[in-house]
Image (tube, rainbow, N blue to C red):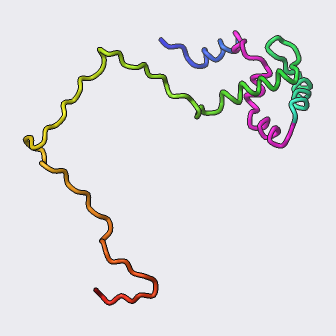
Amino acid sequence: MAPRIDTLRAQVRREGFDTRRSDLWRYMLDHRPQIAEMRGEGATWRAIGEAMRKLGLLDRDKKPPTNETVRQTWAKIDKGMKPEVHRRPPRVRPLLPEEMPEAVPERSRGGAGLAAEPEQPRRKFRRTAARFIGEEDNGN
């Protein structure tokens, strides 16, 4: 029988959340749009770090965060939220000689089902005599 979600939530609350993540990290993740807006308006990491310390947030080592810790934590959160568009394509191993496909034999001319001469491509424009500016068209 699967445990009820209420029981699971209560157990998680008793045992605590992921302890690898600091209060600072959780706060910054929860308030990501507001912090991004402040950064867009020119707020410095020094000012943001001071605000985080005043809020009583602690880093992973249970210490008040330095400005550099705040900046690095933000970089990790921001990187994790952005789609990876510049991902390198996977490397492809070159084929070994025994894995190479067999060579395709050349088609002989005039074989069964093959046209003797390839079709000429259709011309896009009609050839006409050159005309000069001011010359009248006589309909020829």
In the image: residue 107, left or right of residue 2: left
Q: Position of residue 3 (x, y in %)?
A: 54, 13
Please identify the quadrant where the C terminus is shown.
Answer: bottom left
Residue at the (58%, 19%) spot, across then down: 5
Q: In this view, does 123 lie to the left or right of 90?
A: left
Most extreme residue toward the left is 112
In magenta stretch: residue 11: no
Q: In this view, does 22 lie above or below 40?
A: above
Task: Give the side of residue 50 with respect to residue 81, left or right.
Answer: right
In the image, residue 14 lies at what x, y percent? 70, 11
User: What is the number of callouts on the image?
Assistant: 0
Residue at point 72% right, 13% down?
A: 20
Q: Is residue 41 in the magenta section?
A: yes
Query: Which corner quadrant of the image does residue 119 belong to?
Result: bottom left
Question: Quarter-wise, where is residue 60 in the image?
Answer: top right
- Tell me which segment is drawn in magenta: 15-43
Could you say which is closer to the camera, residue 12 or residue 56?
56
Give x and y (percent) for residue 10.
66, 15
The dominant secondary structure in magenta is: helix
Q: Where is residue 27 in the image (x, y as percent from the top left)?
A: 78, 26
